[in-house]
């Protein structure tokens, strides 16, 4: 587990804002069959695997809150979903260097969980979702396809900003 320093928090903040902008302006508008890929979930899982449960939860909440502010659903829904998934993924504390298959599995489970929790919360709030369960397989597949591009970058950034080089 990597300790999050002020420089790491600043880098993560910049990375999060860039990911939210990329998600909302490019990925959400791609004419793909089924649902859209969710770069934000993959980013949160990458942070959680690299830095642990607390960092995963904080990154998930912040990322979800930014995404909530740019969407039509109630504010806080994605913050809750991403924060919970970031915390649970961070409990695994996987080594992303040696556990590539594990990272793929964690992203797949996290993407499916986030989507199902999101649909459940919208149902409780009596808000109809834009998609439905039919979009779940394609969304999970797209998120898994983003994994080799996002998780290693986050892990490398976490290693580079780690104040203790012995880890």
Image (spheres, helix red, strand yellow):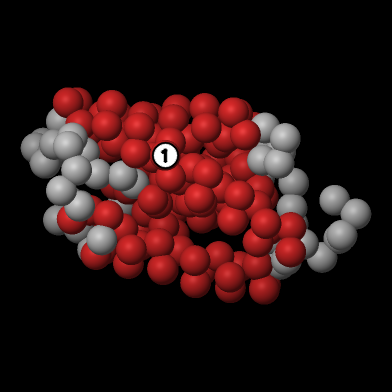
Asked if residue 89 shows in the view, the reply is yes
Q: In this view, does 117 lie to the left or right of 95?
A: left
Q: Is residue 109 left or right of residue 159?
A: left
Rendered location of residue 22, percent (x, y): 33, 63
> In the rendered image, which quarter is residue 97 located in?
top right
Q: In this view, does 12 lie to the left or right of 4?
A: left
Q: Name the residue under label 1.
A: 145
Q: In this view, does 120 lie to the left or right of 16?
A: left
Rendered location of residue 20, percent (x, y): 35, 62
Identify the residue at image location x=31%, y=58%. 23
Estimate how packed mark 1 is, as few (under 14), some (14 to 19) or many (20 or more) residues with alpha carbons within 10 Å. Answer: some
Rendered location of residue 61, percent (x, y): 44, 53
> In the rendered image, which quarter is residue 113 located in?
top left
Relative to 154, residue 90 above or below: above
Viewer-side residue, 31 vs 40: 31
Instruction: Give the number of callouts.
Output: 1
Identify the residue at image location x=85%, y=51%. 167
Identify the residue at image location x=41%, y=57%. 63
């Amino acid at each position: 587990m990597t300790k999050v320093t002020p420089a790491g928090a600043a880098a993560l903040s910049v990375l999060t804002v860039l990911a939210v902008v990329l998600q909302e302006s490019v990925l959400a508008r791609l004419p793909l069959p089924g649902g859209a890929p969710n770069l934000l979930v993959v980013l949160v899982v990458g942070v959680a695997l690299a830095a642990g449960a607390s960092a995963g939860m904080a990154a998930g909440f912040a990322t979800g809150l930014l995404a909530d502010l740019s969407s039509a659903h109630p504010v806080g829904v994605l913050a809750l979903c991403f924060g919970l998934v970031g915390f649970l993924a961070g409990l695994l504390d996987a080594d992303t260097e040696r556990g590539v298959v594990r990272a793929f599995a964690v992203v797949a489970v996290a993407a499916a969980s986030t989507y199902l929790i999101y649909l459940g919360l919208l149902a409780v709030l009596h808000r109809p979702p834009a998609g439905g369960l039919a979009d779940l397989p394609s969304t999970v597949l797209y998120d898994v396809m983003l994994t080799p591009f996002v998780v290693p970058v986050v892990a490398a950034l976490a290693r580079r900003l780690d104040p203790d080089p012995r880890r």
